[in-house]
Amino acid sequence: MEDVKRILVVSSMMKSSSKAIHYGVSLSKKYGTELYVLHVVYHPFGFDLEGWNLPIPSLEEEYKRTIKEAKEELDALINQEKKKGMSIKEMLREGKPIEEILKVIKEEDINLIIMVAHSEWRLEHFLFGRIKEEIIRKMPCSVFLIKDEPGKVAFDD
């Protein structure tokens, strides 16, 4: 991993992203790389996004609640690592995930992306499953996929 200088953990703002952050922290410590965490906020129920005008208020409310809970959990995880002395550059972008990820890769000269390969639950798969496949095809750098097994706790350093 000599060529890897900057690692980007892609967070879909779902609970399953915590496992990818754990891996990012671990690899960054081990290889002395810079660590970035990108939270991409995607509004799939917004009227301005192609093909997503779903008239299902309960689904939108569930999505918002899930995002809020996941953000709190991920913030706590990142802050815990920062308190231990870990330097993490955290970014929040809104928009289409693929476009935002590609922008950050170019802006920050990222060498390795870490992201969760499997969705934790059906709504996440519905919202992000196809995006992950497209990300893998379009990335100009290596992609490290973390298999997420729901119910299993991510490792501690």
Image (cartoon, grey):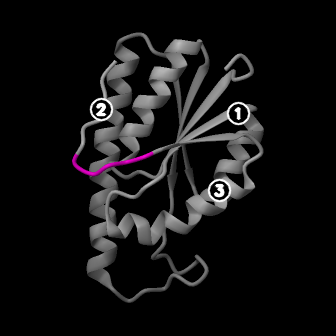
Q: Is residue 95 visible?
A: no
Instruction: Name above or below for residue 44 compared with residue 155.
Output: below
Check disc 2 and report the residue beneath it.
76
Where's residue 33, x and y in %?
Answer: 61, 18
CB within 8 Å, label 3 to label 1: no
Frontmost of labels 3 and 2 is 3
Q: Is residue 122 above or below residue 78?
A: below
Q: Residue at x 24, y 42 (%)?
A: 152
Q: CA distance from mark 3 to mark 1?
A: 14 Å
> What kind of residue is marked 3?
Ile
Q: Determine crowd level at label 1: few under 14, some 14-19, many 20+ residues with C-alpha closer than 10 A.
A: many
When the figure is inspected, residue 62 is found, relative to residue 143, above or below; the finding is: below
The span picked out in magenta is: 147-151
How many neighbours does mark 3 have within 10 angstroms: few (below 14), some (14-19), or many (20 or more)?
A: some
Is mark 3 in CB contact (under 8 Å) with mark 2? Answer: no
Q: Relative to residue 31, is residue 56 drawn left or right?
A: left
Asked whether disc 1 touches disc 2, contact meaning CB atoms under 8 Å apart, the reply is no
Secondary structure under tag 3 reads helix
Q: What quarter of the picture does the N terminus occupy?
A: top right
**Residue, disc 1:** 110
Residue 153 on image: x %, y %: 25, 37
Instruction: Identify residue type, mark 1.
Output: Ile
Task: Label 1, secondary structure: give it.
Answer: loop
Say which label, 3 or 1, has the lower sequence index: 1
**Kind of residue indicated by mark 2:** Ala
Q: Residue at x 51, y 81 (%)?
A: 52
Using the numbered discs, state the Cα–Cα distance from disc 3 to disc 2 in whole angstroms: 27 Å
Q: Which of the pair 3/21 is nearer the observer?
A: 3
Q: Nearer the viewer, residue 106 or 140?
A: 140
**For mark 3, what is the residue?**
135
The answer to whether one can see residue 75 in this image is yes
